[in-house]
């Protein structure tokens, strides 16, 4: 399962020295300067196994040889899903082999720019939207518009999310997953809990859970990115989708009253969040829900990976309404998929593989192996979907507006250099909202230029 990430090695050169200094002075998920250096071992692991083909200039002709696939799907379930897709592809393409090079998820993200400028795999896992456009605009990804010419079932929205600033396609979506409030049905049934529709109802429920001996909302932000989802949900509910998108684009004042209200609201919610979150990974937080120690968890549906054999006990609800005038019809549903290197060693093979990854047949294999995600191709079968997958698909289809995620919707350098430490500072000391937002605004101006 793909999750938010950073392109720090390249972006460090774009960030003003004053902002970089603040980042290097603190301990965070990127572990200081170590995140800015790609290791020879990583490059070796991610560049081996490719071979040329007889026809590699345009994807035409017979595709043969070996295609290398760089994967960040290092957790057990998504790693097995990638293997299942590759095995199915090879079965239908006897002349092609695929060598999968799996790298730890966070390491892959932290070193992605150096990886792409070194000897990248022919095909590599990445994210839709801003993240895809960023590398396409830097000339670090290959044009796969011809692959899109034969991808029936992909919606216009999926194509838009895969299109670079130049109008060409650089990305093939494979799956998506919603962010929502997850809970165990058995626990809620035993306690008589009901889904909260408003912030006030959420707070009331949280206090009831505390009285019942449960941690109301599981929470872990050791890796830096999970809490971004909480900021997004509150901002979407307090200020609406249009403001959220504009804020992510650097067009709004982070020190203004609207952003202050987001953090003030969040500060009130910390009362019902699991304490000491900066020392806990998302998997560890998920375990508290799995063990019935917590009542809820705001996360992506990849949470289901931690409930193997118990997925049927998982359910979710939309993050509650905060302002009736804003409503709750904006959600987040990040899209994961694959891109091609700028100069793949086996272009014909790479495009053949990407075409299969984007096909309904390929995604049928994927979602069967990983029931926490939903197929991006509209022609993929839903017959074998779990109840969670069916609900996820309906949830996304019914949304009026869909965001990707904070660090996918804004400049990667701003997300990783400014927002990760800022949010973690807020979690540690939530009392100085004015000072926090002023600091964010100053850094935003340094990065965005206004």
Image (tube, grey):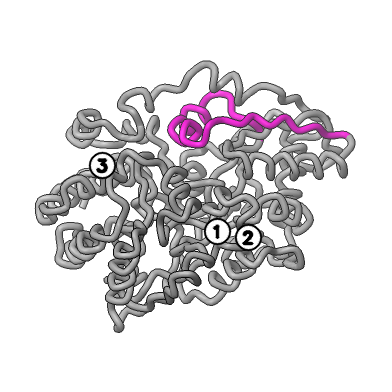
Q: Is residue 389 above or below residue 6?
A: below
| Residue 406 x %, y % | 37, 54
Q: Residues under labels 3 and 1: Cα distance?
A: 26 Å
Residue 239, can we see it? no
Compute the Cα span from label 2 to label 3. Answer: 32 Å
| Residue at image coords 81%, 44% | 88
Residue 374: which numbered mark, if any? 2
Left or right: 34 as drawn, with respect to 93:
left
Residue assigned mark 1: 177
Q: Which of marks 2 and 3 is nearer the N terminus?
A: 2
Of all residues, the one furthest to the right in this rendering is 94
The mark nearer the N terminus, 3 or 1, is 1
Q: Which residue is drawn at 68% across and 61% down?
A: 377
Corner quadrant of residue 75: top right
Q: Give neighbour class at mark 2: few <14, some 14-19, many 20+ (Cα, 10 Å).
A: many
Q: Quadrant of residue 30?
A: top left
Labels 1 & 2 near each other (Cβ < 8 A): yes
In the rendered structure, which segment of residues is drawn in magenta? 95-122
Q: How far apart are marks 1 and 2 (CA)?
A: 6 Å
Q: What element carries label 1?
A: loop
Residue wearing tag 3: 421
């Amino acid at each position: 399962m793909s999750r938010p990430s950073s392109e720090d090695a390249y972006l460090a050169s774009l960030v003003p020295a004053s902002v970089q200094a603040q980042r290097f002075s603190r301990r965070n998920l990127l572990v200081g300067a170590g995140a800015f250096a790609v290791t020879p071992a990583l490059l070796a692991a991610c560049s081996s196994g490719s071979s040329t083909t007889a026809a590699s200039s345009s994807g035409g002709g017979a595709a043969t040889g070996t295609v290398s696939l760089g994967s960040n799907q290092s957790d057990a379930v998504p790693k097995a899903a990638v293997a299942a897709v590759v095995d199915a592809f090879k079965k239908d393409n006897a002349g092609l082999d695929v060598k999968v090079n799996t790298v730890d998820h966070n390491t892959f993200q932290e070193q992605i720019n150096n990886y792409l400028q070194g000897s990248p795999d022919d095909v590599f896992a990445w994210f839709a939207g801003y993240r895809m456009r960023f590398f396409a605009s830097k000339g670090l990804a290959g044009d796969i518009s011809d692959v899109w010419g034969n991808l029936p079932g992909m919606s216009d929205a999926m194509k838009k999310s895969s299109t670079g600033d130049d109008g060409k396609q650089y990305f093939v979506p494979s799956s998506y997953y919603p962010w929502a409030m997850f809970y165990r049905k058995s626990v809620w049934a035993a306690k008589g809990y009901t889904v909260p529709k408003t912030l006030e109802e959420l707070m009331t429920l949280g206090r009831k859970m505390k009285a019942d001996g449960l941690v109301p909302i599981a929470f872990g932000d050791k890796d830096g990115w999970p809490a971004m989802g909480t900021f997004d949900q509150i901002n979407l509910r307090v200020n609406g989708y249009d403001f959220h998108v504009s804020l992510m684009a650097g067009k709004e004042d982070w020190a203004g009253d609207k952003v202050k209200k987001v953090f003030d609201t969040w500060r009130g919610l910390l009362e019902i969040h699991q304490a000491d979150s900066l020392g806990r990974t998302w998997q560890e937080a998920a375990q508290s829900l799995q063990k019935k120690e917590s009542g809820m968890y705001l996360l992506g549906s990849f949470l289901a990976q931690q409930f193997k054999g118990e997925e049927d006990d998982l359910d979710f609800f939309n993050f509650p309404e905060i302002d009736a005038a804003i409503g709750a019809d904006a959600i987040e549903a990040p899209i994961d998929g694959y891109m091609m290197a700028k100069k793949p060693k086996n272009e014909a093979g790479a495009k053949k593989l990407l075409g299969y990854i984007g096909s309904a047949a390929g995604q049928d294999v994927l979602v069967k192996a990983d029931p926490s995600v939903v197929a991006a191709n509209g022609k993929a079968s839903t017959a074998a979907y779990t109840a969670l997958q069916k609900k996820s698909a309906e949830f996304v289809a019914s949304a009026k507006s869909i965001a990707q995620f904070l660090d996918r919707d804004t400049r990667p350098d701003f997300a990783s250099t400014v927002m990760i430490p800022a949010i973690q500072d807020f979690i540690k000391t939530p009392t100085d909202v004015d000072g926090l937002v002023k600091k964010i605004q100053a850094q935003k101006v340094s990065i965005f230029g206004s």
